[in-house]
Amino acid sequence: MSENTKKLLLSLGEDPNLVTEFKKDPKAVMSRFEVPADHQEMIIKGDKDGLKEAAGLDDAMCRLIIF
């Protein structure tokens, strides 16, 4: 389970400015939140199922990464 991945996704759900920043440079935002590299790849690819399994996330949190 990755607490950093969860923190990023929760923050994206709460902070519209972060969403704008994420859309412009997702890798920079994920690095700032110290999201593990394998989770970053899954987020970029939109691999919701892989991310759910690897990070211990639920459907609601994973929907945040699909804009």
Image (cartoon, rainbow, N blue to C red):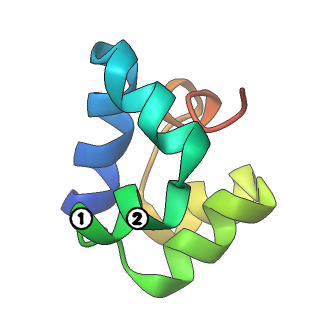
Pointer 2 with pointer 1, Cβ within 8 A = yes
Label 1 neighbourhood size at 10 Å, few (<14), some (14-19), many (20+)? few
Residue pointed to by mark 2: 28
Q: Which residue: 28% across, 15% down? A: 14
Q: CA distance from mark 2 to mark 1?
A: 6 Å
Considering only vertical position in the picture, is 11 above or below 14? below
Considering only vertical position in the picture, is 40 above or below 12? below
Considering only vertical position in the picture, is 39 above or below 20? below
Residue 11 spot, x, y in % from top left: 27, 31
The picture quadrant where one finds residue 53 is: bottom right
Residue 49 spot, x, y in % from top left: 73, 55
User: Is residue 6 visible to the viewer in this orientation of the structure?
Assistant: yes
Secondary structure under tag 2 reads: helix
Frontmost residue, 51 versus 45: 45
Q: Which residue: 41% across, 57% down? A: 56
Identity, as a three-letter code, of the amino acid under mark 2: Ala
Q: Which residue: 38% across, 39% down? A: 9
Identity, as a three-letter code, of the amino acid under mark 1: Arg
Secondary structure under tag 1 reads: helix
* Residue 32 badge: 1
Residue 32 relative to residue 24: left or right: left
